[in-house]
Image (cartoon, grey):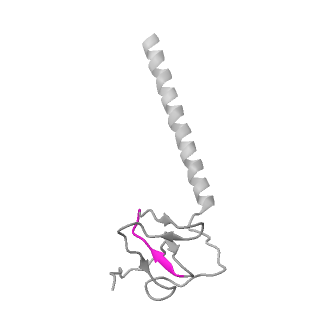
C-alpha cells in the first residue's frame, strides 16, 4: 500500500489513464503522449492508479466550476497601493536629488 500523508488537500496534476481511472505521477514527471487523449507514465515511473472516492483519490465534482481562491478586487487594491508607494518613493528621490543639486550649485 503506498504511503499517503494524513493531511488531505486538493491536488492538481492528475491525468486520466483510462476510462475514468485517475492516475497520479510524481511532480515534474513528463508523461508520454499515446494519442490525442491518452498518456502513459514515463519510463521507470509507476503511476499511482485508483478510482474516484476510493480513499486514495477524492470524489469527482461533476458540473462544478472552480471559483479558485484568487480575490481579483483585493489583488487590484494591492497593485494600486504598490503603485502609489512606488510613486511616493520616486517623488522623494526626485526631491532629494533636487536638494542635492541645489546644494552643489550653491
Q: Is residue 32 above or below residue 90?
A: below
Q: Pick whichever, 4 or 68, lies toward us.
A: 4
Q: Is residue 96 above or below residue 12?
A: above
The answer to whether any part of residue 106 appears in the image is no
Across and down, in percent, residue 31 comes to 46, 65
Q: List the single residue furthest toward the front.
A: 34
Q: Is residue 23 magenta?
A: yes
Q: Pick whichever, 73 or 15, lies toward us.
A: 15
Q: Is residue 89 above or below residue 94?
A: below
Total labels drawn = 0
Q: List the single residue furthest toward the top.
A: 106
Across and down, in percent, residue 92 comes to 50, 32
* Magenta residues, start to end: 21-28
Across and down, in percent, residue 22 comes to 50, 79
Name which residue lies at 37% across and 70% down: 45
The answer to whether any part of residue 105 appears in the image is yes
Which corner quadrant of the image does residue 9 belong to? bottom left
Which corner quadrant of the image does residue 88 belong to? top right
Amino acid at each position: 500500500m503506498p504511503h499517503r500523508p494524513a493531511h488531505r488537500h486538493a491536488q492538481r496534476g492528475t491525468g486520466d489513464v483510462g476510462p475514468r481511472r485517475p492516475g497520479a505521477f510524481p511532480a515534474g514527471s513528463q508523461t508520454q503522449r499515446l494519442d490525442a487523449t491518452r498518456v502513459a507514465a514515463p519510463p521507470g515511473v509507476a503511476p499511482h492508479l485508483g478510482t474516484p472516492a476510493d480513499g486514495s483519490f477524492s470524489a469527482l465534482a461533476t458540473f462544478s466550476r472552480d471559483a479558485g481562491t484568487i480575490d481579483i478586487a483585493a489583488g487590484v487594491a494591492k497593485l494600486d497601493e504598490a503603485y502609489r508607494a512606488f510613486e511616493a518613493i520616486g517623488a522623494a528621490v526626485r526631491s532629494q536629488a533636487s536638494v542635492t543639486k541645489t546644494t552643489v550649485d550653491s
